[in-house]
């Protein structure tokens, strides 16, 4: 018999994954060209050529026993030094190799950070809509996720509600910018006010409150908007980064965690995160791709491709009468459902072979998420179906 905690997870499996698997089933039944799967953020542009060239060269030239062997749980020292140097160059920070932990993607980094700081009963605050797994990650360590309801006009965090939610049980706050599922970038003003609130409340409660910034979409920005680097605004900040989207490497599971020297108990915090990397079963980040990304830190996937997709699908849906804030980053649209129960809309869209994810999966009912990191042809071919949905609900 499986554990009670896992029984709850089995019974409430990720809707995103379920829709993705349903899309694969429908593709076999109706043909892939006739199914428009917008369910999962799986990059549809290849990794930069340098990634492939670097991987091939390393496989040919490096000693395979060393290349595929264990290293320190934190990762190769030379890789961590290069990552720190790259961050310093781009954001004017002062990191060193000791501030960097190479991780199995941002998800593993988040788990390492949470395991390092959460005691049973601690609370972690997140701003809805948020990535569906945050609640599960916090629960992994017997913490409780406290969700702040969204401001659906701007999808910037509601800072008044946030301040009211901070208690003597609050251990951390998770932010995600550019945001999944809205594509909104949290402004510098938002980060400054958020940091001021956290600093003041931390002093009042005599409690270290950590800000964990989940940043897999940092490089995917389509406007002149700047994504603030949070360690410059708040000392107790931890950054989780992934190369999954930046370099189109989601299956390689490679990212890193940043723990600044300025963070409370930074040495112990980094030591705890490194040990967490081992005891949650990751041991270390993938050896080959640590070395690959270290040589590709200035590379990016084809962001213009995503920008073209964004403009096409956003403009079409707006023309058809759908309501959606235009994303500044990431590769998602968060579309207001034409009916209060967005799951009804998801079911209706499925009749058009259009797969969407209900907003309730992100703690924000009444909306659906659409991932536009798909082939441009998928978007074009889906538009007649969206138009029929618009007509069905009397939007156009």
Image: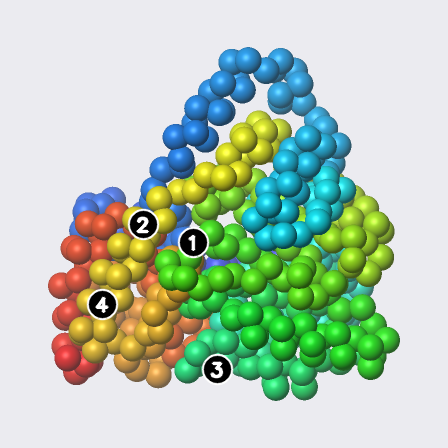
Cβ–Cβ under 8 Å for marks 4 and 2: no
Q: Residue 304 carries which label?
A: 2
Q: Name the residue under label 1.
A: 220
Q: Nearer the viewer, residue 134 or 136?
A: 134
Q: What element carries label 1?
A: loop
Q: In which quarter of the image is residue 124?
A: bottom right
| Residues at marks 3 and 4, CA–CA distance in whole angstroms | 23 Å
Viewer can see residue 54: yes
| Residues at marks 4 and 2, CA–CA distance in whole angstroms | 16 Å
First in sequence, mark 2 or 3: give its number: 3
Q: Which of 98 and 391 is in front in this view?
A: 98
- Percent x, y of residue 15: 44, 61
| Residues at marks 4 and 1, CA–CA distance in whole angstroms | 19 Å
| Residues at marks 2 and 1, CA–CA distance in whole angstroms | 9 Å
Q: Residue 151 carries which label?
A: 3
Q: Is mark 3 on a helix, strand or loop?
A: loop
Q: In which quarter of the image is residue 277?
A: top right
First in sequence, mark 2 or 1: give its number: 1
- Percent x, y of residue 162: 63, 81
Q: Name the residue under label 4.
A: 315
Q: Is residue 71 left or right of residue 12?
A: right
| Residues at marks 3 and 1, CA–CA distance in whole angstroms | 23 Å
250 versus 381 height, above or below: above
232 versus 107 height, above or below: below
Q: Is mark 4 on a helix, strand or loop?
A: helix
- Number of residues whose C-alpha sits closer than 10 Å to that of mark 2, classed few (under 14), some (14–19) or many (20 or more): few
| Residues at marks 2 and 3, CA–CA distance in whole angstroms | 29 Å
Query: Which residue is at a point 67% across and 72% down the rendered structure image?
Result: 195
């Amino acid at each position: 018999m499986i554990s009670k905690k896992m029984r709850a997870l089995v019974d409430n499996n990720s809707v995103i994954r379920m829709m993705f698997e349903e899309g694969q089933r429908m593709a076999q039944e109706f043909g892939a060209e006739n199914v428009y799967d917008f369910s999962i953020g799986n990059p549809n542009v290849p990794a930069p050529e340098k990634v492939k060239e670097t991987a091939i060269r390393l496989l040919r030239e490096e000693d395979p026993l060393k290349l595929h062997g264990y290293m320190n749980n934190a990762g190769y020292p030379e890789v961590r030094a290069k990552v720190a140097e790259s961050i310093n160059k781009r954001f004017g920070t002062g990191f060193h190799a000791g501030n960097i932990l190479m991780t199995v993607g941002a998800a593993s980094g988040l788990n390492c950070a949470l395991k390092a700081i959460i005691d049973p009963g601690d609370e972690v605050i997140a701003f809805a809509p948020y990535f569906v797994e945050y609640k599960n990650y916090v629960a992994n360590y017997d913490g409780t996720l406290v969700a702040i309801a969204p401001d659906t006009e701007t999808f910037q965090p509601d800072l008044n509600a946030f301040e009211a939610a901070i208690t003597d049980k609050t251990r951390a706050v998770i932010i995600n910018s550019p945001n999944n599922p809205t594509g909104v970038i949290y402004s510098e003003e938002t980060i400054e006010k958020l940091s001021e609130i956290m600093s003041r409340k931390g002093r009042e409660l005599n409690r270290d409150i950590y800000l964990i910034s989940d940043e897999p979409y940092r490089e995917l920005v389509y406007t002149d908007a700047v994504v603030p680097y949070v360690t410059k605004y708040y000392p107790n900040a931890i950054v989780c980064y992934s190369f999954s989207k930046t370099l189109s490497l989601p299956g390689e599971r490679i990212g890193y965690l940043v723990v600044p020297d300025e963070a409370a108990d930074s040495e112990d915090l980094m030591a705890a995160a490194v040990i967490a990397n081992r005891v949650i079963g990751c041991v270390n980040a993938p050896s080959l791709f640590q070395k690959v990304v270290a040589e590709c830190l200035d590379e990016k996937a084809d962001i213009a491709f995503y920008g073209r997709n964004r403009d096409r699908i956003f403009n079409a849906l707006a023309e058809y009468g759908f309501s959606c804030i235009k994303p500044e980053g990431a590769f998602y649209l968060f579309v207001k459902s034409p009916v209060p129960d967005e799951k009804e809309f998801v079911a209706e869209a499925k009749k058009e072979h259009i797969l969407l994810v209900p907003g309730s999966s992100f703690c924000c009912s009444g909306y659906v998420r659409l991932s536009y990191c798909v082939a441009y042809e998928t978007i074009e071919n889906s538009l007649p179906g969206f138009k029929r949905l618009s007509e069905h609900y009397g939007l156009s």
